[in-house]
Image (cartoon, rainbow, N blue to C red):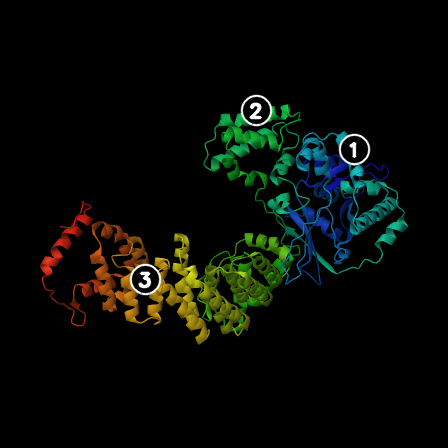
Amino acid sequence: MHLPLTKISLQTYPGIRHHGPGSARRVLSRLDALRPGKVLIDGPADLTDQLPHLTHPQMVPPVALLAYNEKQPERAVFWPFAEYSPEYQAAVWAIRHGAELAFIDLPVAQRFDPSEITTGDEETSCENNDPAPPEPVLVAPQNHDPFTILGQLLGYEDGESFWNDFFETEGGEDAFDAIDTAIEALRAEQDLTQMEARREAHMRLEIAKAAKEAEAPVAVIFGVWHVPALKAKHTAKADRDLLKGLKKEKIKSSWVPWTSPRLSRASGYGAGVQAPKWYEHLWRAGSDEGADAAWSVHIARLMHEAGHVVSTASSIEVIRLARSLAALRERPRPGLEELREAAIACLSFGEVLPWREIETQPLLGSDVGHVPADLPLAPLLEDLTRQQKKAKLKPQALEKELSLDLRTSSGLTRSTLLHRLNALDVPWGKKVGSGRSRGTFRENWLLRWEPEYAVELVEKLIYGTTIETACSARLSEQMQQETSLAALSDLTFTALTAQIPRAVDVGIQRMDDIAALTDDCGALLSAVPALVETIRYGQARETNTDALIAIVTRMVTQGAIALPLAARGLAPDEAARFFEMLPATQRAIGLADLGDDLTHAWAAALQKVALEERSTPIVAGVAARLCYEAAYLDEDAVATRVTQAISPGVLIADAAGFFEGFFTGSGQRLIHDSALRRVVDAWLLSLDEEGFVAHLPLLRRVFSGMDKNERHELLGRLLGRNAAQGEFELVENADEIWAPHAQILTRILNKEPTHVP
């Protein structure tokens, strides 16, 4: 947004930019010279009563004026103010000097008509029509950026550099006068929207009214884009006719804390600047010739804190190089571009990466504004206060344990609130204990309120103005953007625990659409466990889960058909993925009780993977183990398959893969299954010295899951101990058998060269 200042009787309109420190200084200079009795600012006329709060002792910018539709609170508009914003400085000047202060733009109450809601260049608008995911609209003039156009005509890459050179660092009065003429030429090539025309009509009427009533000079601050329209002659009747028929909606407004990164154009704010902290530096440094030196010292300090070696001499060279670059480019003094290039050259020897590590702080910063506690709260914070009272939960800075019984109304209310806040990135409560134990009616939480959570809620206002609507909109948006079935199932569970049925429906529909189109067996099966747990949670809470059951049935059916082929020739990372996924899917199918037909189809798929020689060994091994545990294959069939898979004729790497897949996590099987022990024993005895040594890490990994007692019991079984009597049975020729093995083991433990005697 760009703003001018004028004395009505003189009809002069010099252009001034929103969020421009040099522009703000010129506003104050002219106000001091003019001493107006009334100051008019480009902003919604029905929010004028909020302006006096800017001088509250506890008001610390950046802050934003928020207005939202009372009937549809998820529809909201923001007007951000920085310390260096011309409107902010003008408003503060007017209040402190006793001048009358007012907004003159179209009332926000007339901007919520869906067919008309367009925008002012200073506003940030968010609309959220649940259940469709919201698209935050940042309403600066998207169809025209006058400074980018002017900058490109003069050889600049963007309007930011152009404005910095001509208005922030140099900024002669002639430049401000010249830009009015340029804007007038640009407007001649643009078609105004109806809303923009109405805004300008309303401003003309307000200015005329103020001029008629004023006994002292009147200062008007508005967008430089509007200068030609406000200078041109229009009849009051024509302007009033243009405003006829606009509906008025009931609105609410309040001040909210803002953040310096949200003042940047990169955040999506159309009227934002490239580097808010740089403009803050220019505002506070003023016309001081040492501003570039102070900036250089700041950068050097940040790089030093990041662990880089920075000398005083290098900092001095930054200043010299930046000033030389400015002189070569015929610029009045170094700007951000020159200082950044000089810092990279002198402080990181031309390497961009060190600069990238620290650039966020000097360019965007992390400042958070503060709004006085006695002012009306932002909608989400206001709703949170209501929900806290309803749930009888008081925010505390110290950690507090909370145990909830979800079968009670109070327990469910508290749980729902905490889950919704977590979905909005406000972890006031963190679940502790058994993690994702979803089949229980109890939850354990650890509560601790942090001040920055208020800022998180303010930032989430783009999704809605109540905890429920914001949570619903954000989850719906995440679901629409997500392509992973597993991630979608997690988001759906989050929506279910947060009691957001609309988001649950969005997640179910999204999963159904993706599952219908995917042929990725891994993607299908990896989503099943979380979905089954979601179904169990929903059934425990008496939630209709028929749609989820239908999706799980489809996924298991498609996955069972695709699994035998998908398990062949897998790369190591994919094989590891299937190794983890198949047991989890097997457990989930067992818990889901999906019917005999589907269970048989899944069992047949596992059998094919286990018995198929072309299956990836580690996947075949885990499939064989699952078939053995679920009795899909009998002991003889499994023993035969294990013998084939780890026989001497099989490549060592393949045998090891099958061995790892079958035995990892199933040491108890070896203790109690003598047939399996004989198979493994025969395989180990078939290995030569090199193969045995190579497989020691594998053996350690496989048996590491057994505790001391289990290992002791397994060793007893191998040595022939009678488990019932606790005694050992003598093996014929035991001394002769053990002696060579003992020698080899001793040399291995001593890391000596080994050979079979």
Say whether residue 213 is left or right of residue 460. Answer: right
Which labelled disc corresponds to residue 177? 1
Of the residues shown, which amino acid type is indicated by label 2?
A: Arg
In the foreground, 224 or 675: 675
Callout 1: 10 Å neighbours few (<14), some, many (20+)?
some
| Residue 376 on image: x %, y % | 66, 56
| Residue 320 on image: x %, y % | 57, 24
The reply to whether residue 302 is visible in this rendering is no
Of the residues shown, which amino acid type is indicated by label 3?
A: Phe
Which labelled disc corresponds to residue 741? none
Give the CA distance from mark 1 to mark 3: 81 Å
Say whether residue 244 is left or right of residue 477. Answer: right
Q: Which residue is mark 2?
A: 320
Give the CA distance from mark 2 to mark 1: 33 Å
Q: Earlier in the sequence, mark 1 or mark 3?
A: 1
Q: Which residue is mark 3?
A: 662
Evaluate if marks 1 and 3 touch, with contact meaning CB atoms under 8 Å apart. Answer: no
Of the residues shown, which amino acid type is indicated by label 1?
A: Asp
Vertical relation: 485 (above or below) 123: below
Evaluate if marks 2 and 3 touch, with contact meaning CB atoms under 8 Å apart. Answer: no
Q: Circle 2 — which element?
A: helix
- Name the image quarter holding residue 112: bottom right
Q: Earlier in the sequence, mark 2 or mark 3?
A: 2
The reply to whether residue 675 is visible in this rendering is yes
Q: Circle 3 — which element?
A: helix
Give the CA distance from mark 2 to mark 3: 69 Å
Front disc: 1 or 3 = 3
Say whether residue 206 is left or right of residue 56. Answer: right
Q: Circle 1 — which element?
A: helix
Q: Earlier in the sequence, mark 2 or mark 1?
A: 1
Callout 2: 10 Å neighbours few (<14), some, many (20+)?
some
